[in-house]
Amino acid sequence: MSGDGYRYGTHRFWEMLQGLLFWLTLGLSILLSFVVPVWVIVFIIIFDLFWLFRVLYFVVHLMGAWKSYRTTIATDWLSKLATIPASQNIYHLIFLPTYQEHIDIIRGTLRSIRDCAFPNDRLMIVLAGEQRDSVHFQKNAELVRREFGTVFQKIIVTEHPMNQPDEVPGKGSNLHHSGKQVAEILSRDCPEIPDDQIVVSCFDVDTVVHPQYFAYLSYLYTTVDQPLRTSYQPVALFANNIWTTPAPVRIAAFGTTFWILTELARPERLWTFSSHSMPWVMLKDVGFWQKDIVTEDSRIFMQAFLHYEGNYRVTPMFMPVSMDTVSGQTYYAALIALYKQMRRWAWGVEHLPYMIDQFPKHPKISRAAKFKYLFNHMEGMYTWAAAPLLIFILGWLPLYVTSNSPNALVQTAPFTLEWLMRLSMIGVFVSGLMSLFLLPPRPKAVRKHAWVMMILQWALLPITFILFGALPAIDAQTRLMLGKYLGFNVTKKIRKN
């Protein structure tokens, strides 16, 4: 569904296409391994060579992004901001959608915002709760008012009604309702603040911001070209509770951060993801977040891109915001939560039929731009689902079938594939090393030898690559292909002292 005219089921072929591409690849790989195994071996060697180049490409961009990241967090942005007179008029509106969260999670986020190097009297907080959690939410809201009511310029509390028509219950519909409520409140209570002086940050409720976040965001907003035509994407760290989560969860968390870093190094293909910031003007222009989808954090970018006929982009912020990794009461529960989170992120496959539906309605957007977004989206989703299986499982099937063949290509293929994979391990080594520099201080309750596991855990990458990379993506694409549309799954936040 979509507020722009597209509804789930409207374009069934395009909903099915991504899943069909994967299952066609899987079926043909197995069938042709028995019919023409030599052809499949050639294909696998070419694919592994492509993967090696992709890993090297990843490492180059990751190192460049890492340098920008270290430079950014070492800069005193508040001092730089003081030299820009226009920055004194910037206000920040921070949306915190919440559902069944413990007050300690909310309190930790608000304290990190309070302690930022930016005037608190120009920070406005929106605590957006759900009616189906009303008793718990209102109790938390009252505690927030008591503790922070005099800290920030304004605290706005909204409650999203349940069982609304044409909605998918979840974060997107909550934010859609909250955005409209806040627009009315600001128009009534703060008419002296122009919309173009308000920057919105939409954070997961467990987000802990870097002390320089709002100073840096204000600097960008007052210095970039056309600040009202860009969103602002920070580095998403999942590190608040990373010392106490299972190894597969940590690998997935770091993997997501490294993916974000490499995307920031290529802003021409960047979408918004998770916690990020954007102009208040843009949100009002597009009618706020869509209320009938799951992946509202990335869809809001495409809404703006379409509304402004292609004149919209994402500005990289090499500044971290730290969130919780998924967790559970048991090891197994944490892995289940990780799988569901990755499947929800992979549900971004729903953007393909949306773009197919919307692009013809916007002839002013160039064909090159449309092709770029369609190709990057489809290629990324296909690789997410297919690459791990092709590399670690299906690649060896034709070799098994032809194990007794005297063909020279067949005999040398295992050696070739082994060396291609060894060279590709450079990505694992770089990721493992860099992850150590992203770790927060070790809690006293965590034993010192946990550092050893932080290094050894990367041996699990091939397994996590399949179980919590390929399988959730296959699950999401297959559900969309079959018309089994995914609802919003709330990630539980559990922090252990």
Image: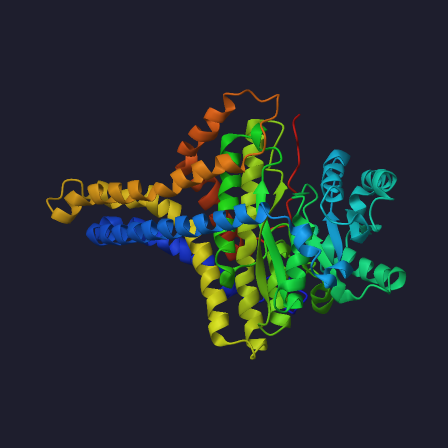
Query: How many numbered badges does the structure rendering display?
Result: 0
Q: Is residue 58 above or below residue 110?
A: below
- The x and y percentages for residue 5 are 65, 69
Residue 430: which quarter of the image? top left
Residue 146 in percent (x, y) is at 88, 39
Quadrant in the picture for the N terminus: bottom right
Classify 400 as above or below 348: above
Q: Nearer the viewer, residue 68 or 82?
A: 82
- As drawn, the residue found furthest toward the left would be 406
| In the displayed structure image, the side of residue 55 where residue 318 appears, left or right | right
Question: x, y percentage for residue 131?
Answer: 81, 47
How does the figure colour the protein chain or chains?
rainbow
Question: Taking 396 as reference, is 178 left or right?
Answer: right
Measuring 38% from the left and 43% from the top, which residue is drawn there?
A: 427
Which quadrant of the figure has residue 360? bottom right
Whether residue 168 appears in this view of the structure is no
Q: Is residue 46 visible?
A: yes
Q: Single out the residue that lies furthest toward the bottom.
A: 363
Find residue 93 and report its horizontal and vertical position in percent: 76, 55
Above/below status of 449 relative to 182: above
Q: Is residue 431 or residue 475 the one in the foreground?
A: 431
Quadrant where the C terminus sits is top right
Q: Is residue 192 above or below residue 92?
A: below
Q: Residue at x 41, y 50 (%)?
A: 58
